[in-house]
Amino acid sequence: MPGAIAINPINWTREETLATAQDSLGSILPNTEGKYVPVKNYADARVDKARCALICSTAEVEKWSPGNVVFIKGIYHSYDYPFYYYNIRENAANRTKIFLNKP
């Protein structure tokens, strides 16, 4: 889409540098009972500026994105929050703290 941007939810930059799964604060993923549980070092992230997309190379395609009528195989858009949950949570807390401390 014209004007669209992608931001890496691990390092909060728009650069194409890979942020490894080890750099991540963690994910929350559904277990076999459908409950979301913390998972350390699961999802990496890299911005692809040409496609204006976030790329995750460590997630299991067949498990999380086998393809359906909404998303083709390998599109993890519905897992943006679960894959990067703890990084997003930390960023939201930091932004809230900064906002509330403004004069």
Image (spheres, rainbow, N blue to C red):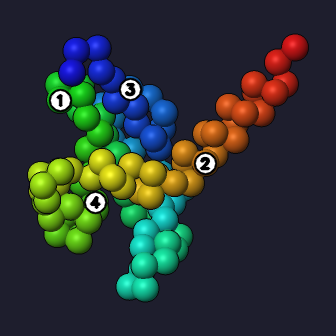
Which of discs 2 and 3 lies nearer the camera? The answer is 2
Residue 35: assigned label: none
Return the x and y of residue 74 as percentages of the image width and height. 16, 54
Q: Residue furthest bottom?
A: 33
Query: As drawn, is 55 to the left or to the right of 42?
Result: left
Q: Residue at 29% of width from left, 14% of height from top?
A: 3
Residue 89: assigned label: 2
Residue type at mark 3: give it: Arg
Residue that carries the numbered disc 3 in the rendered image: 14
Q: 7 or 75, which is in the foreground?
A: 75
The tag earlier along the polypeptide, 3 or 1, is 3
Q: CA distance from mark 3 to mark 1?
A: 13 Å
Residue that carries the numbered disc 4 in the rendered image: 58
Disc 3 element = loop
Q: Residues within 10 Å of mark 4 (few under 14, many from 20)?
A: few
Residue that carries the numbered disc 1 in the rendered image: 51
The tag earlier along the polypeptide, 4 or 1, is 1
Q: 66 or 6, which is in the foreground?
A: 66
Return the x and y of residue 95 as percentages of the image width and height. 68, 31
Query: As drawn, is 33 to the left or to the right of 62?
Result: right
Quadrant of image for the N terminus: top left
Q: CA distance from mark 2 to mark 1?
A: 26 Å
Q: CA distance from mark 4 to mark 1?
A: 19 Å
